[in-house]
Image: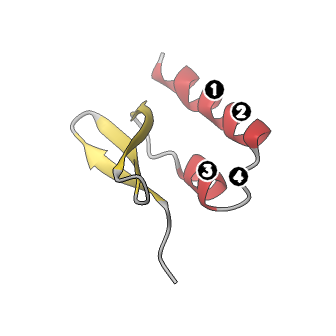
Amino acid sequence: MGGRRYVARGVPGGYRIWDNHGRRFWGDLYELCPDDLLTELNGRKDPARITDLLRRYRALKR
């Protein structure tokens, strides 16, 4: 079967999450690689956990 749907790609200024299925970037620009978020998006996809991780990574940008 196919590989991971969501992967981190390095872009100027940090990382963006690339959706291989939709062939577009998903979410914000992150300064640090969002490994926990990628694991959740490619794994269980728990909405509450994804929301918590998004908030955590947004707080790191400030």
Disc 2 from disc 1: Cα separation: 5 Å
* 22 to the left or right of 37: left
Q: Which residue is drawn at 74% across and 40% down?
A: 47
x and y, in percent, of residue 42 in the image = 60, 60
Q: SS for tag 4? A: loop
Pick the front one: 4 or 33 = 4
Per the rendering, the mark at residue 45 is 4
Of labels 2 and 3, earlier in sequence is 3
For marks 4 and 3 on the same chain, the one whose residue lies earlier in the sequence: 3
The three-letter amino acid code for the residue at tag 4 is Lys
How far apart are the two marked residues, 4 and 2, measured between alpha carbons? 12 Å
Residue at the image point whose x is 67% and y is 62% from the top: 43
Q: Is mark 1 on a helix, strand or loop?
A: helix
Count residues near mark 4 (Cα–Cα under 10 Å), then give few for <14, some for 14-19, many for 20+. Answer: few
Name the residue tied to disc 1. Answer: 55
Q: For mark 3, what is the residue?
A: 36
Please identify the residue farthest to the top as the structure is shown: 62
| Residue 32 as seen in the image, left or right of residue 13 | right
**Cβ atoms at labels 2 and 3 below 8 Å apart:** no
Residues marked 4 and 3 touching at CB (< 8 Å): no
